[in-house]
Amino acid sequence: MPGEGPLAGIRVVELGAIGPGPHAAMLLADLGADVVRVERPDAALRVGRGDQRDQMLRGRRRIALDVKTDAGRQSLVALVDRADVLIDGFRPGAAERMGIGAAESLERNPRLVYGRITGWGQDGPLSATAGHDINYLALTGALAAFGRDGARPTAPLNLVADFGGGSLYFAVGVLSALVERARSGRGQVIDAAMVDGVASLLQLIWALRGTGQWSDQAGANLLDGGAPFYDTYACADGGFVAVGALEPEFFRRLVHGLGWDDADAVAAEQYDPRGWSALRARLAAAFAERTRDEWAREFDGTDACVTPVLSFAEAARHPHLTARDTLIEVDEVVQAAPAPRFSRTPPPAVRPPRAEWDRVDDVLADWTGTAAAAPSAPETERQETR
C-alpha cells in the first residue's frame, strides 16, 4: 500500500480506458495516491512477449470485473462509493451504463471527485464522436502551427492533446477539486476536454496573435522555427543541434561562440526579420562544419542555448538527466521518474505494473476495514481472468 507522497491516503478508481486516463492515473499514483484500475476480464496483464508489462500502468493495483454481471456491477459501485476520485476516460454515457454515472455516484458518495476526461468534452456537436490526439490538435489550430509553410503539418507525438491538454489538465482539475472539497466537504464533476486543454496551452499564441505578433503562416514566427535563432541545424555528421537563443545576451554568446569576427554587429540586428534569411543560411553553414558532439562540447555550460538533439537512448545517458535521476529503470525498462519533486513528502518508490490480478475483496478490505462490507465478484469469475 502506498504510504508516502503528497497524495497518500487518497483513493482513486480508474476505469480501464486508454490514452490520457492511464497517464493521469499514473501521475496520481506516482504522487502516492492509492489507485485501483478496473479492467474487463479479457484485459491483458502483459504486452509484447514474455513477461513484458505496460509501464504506463505502474504504481497501482489492477482488478478484473465483468460489469455485465450483477456481482461485477456491485463490486464496482462499492469501490466508487468509497473512493475520493473516479477517473472516467470513456465516451459520454458509458459510465452511466455501468451503473456509476456522475449523478448517482455523487448521490451515494457526496465527497467524490468525479473526473471525466474526453477529447471533445461532455457536450457540443462532437461530444459523441471518436477522435485522437491529432484530431484535437487539428480543430484547435495547434496542428497547423507544427511545420513549415507549404509543408504538411507534423504531429508532435501525442504529447500536446493526450497528455498536455488531457491528463495534465485533468490532474490539475482533480487536485483543485480536492482542495475545494477540504473547505466545502463536497465533491463535484470535472469535465476535462482535450480541446479545452489544448486551447489553454495555446493562450500565449492567441495573445501574440491578438497583438499582431503572430502570423497564421506556419514557420514564420518567433517560436515555430521562423526565427533563425530558434531552430534546429544539421551538423557535419548528420546529427542536429537545437538553438534557442531568443534573448539578445544569449544570441550574442551564440555568435561569439561560433567565432564570427562581426559577432557584435550580427547580434545588434537579431530581431530585424529582413536579415533572417541570410542569418539562417550563415548559421546552417557554420553548424555544418563540425559534428553534433563537437558543438555540444563547444557550448556546454554556456548561456548560448545550444544543445544536441538526442535520441531516447542518448537521453538516458546524458549527465544532467542521470545526475537528477530524471530517467529511472524499473523492470529493466527505462522510464520517467515521478515529477515534480517534493521537499517534505517525496513520492514513494516506483512500483512496477502488477504481474497478476489483485483480488477485489482485498481492495475492499483495505478501503472498508472489512472484506464483508460489500459484495465482490465470485471466485470463478476471478479465476477466468487470470
Image (cartoon, rainbow, N blue to C red):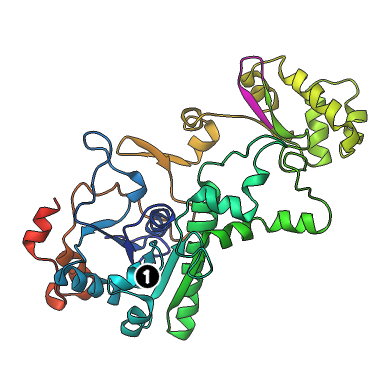
x, y (%) of residue 378? 9, 65
Q: Is residue 371 above or below residue 283?
A: below
Q: Quadrant of the N terminus?
A: bottom left
Judge whether residue 350 can be spotted in this image: no
Q: Is residue 195 above or below residue 322?
A: below
x, y (%) of residue 212? 84, 54
Residue sitting at x 65%, y 18%: 294
Q: Which residues are magenta?
A: 235-242
Q: Is residue 269 above or below residue 348?
A: above
Quick check: is 236 in the magenta stretch?
Answer: yes
x, y (%) of residue 269? 91, 35
The front one of 288 and 185 is 288
The front one of 111 and 148 is 148
- For mark 1, what is the residue? 93
Quick check: is 135 in the magenta stretch?
Answer: no
Asked which secondary structure carries label 1, the reply is: loop
* Residue farthest toward the left in the current orientation of the protein: 380
Q: Amino acid at mark 1?
A: Gly
Left or right of 371: which side holds 201? Answer: right
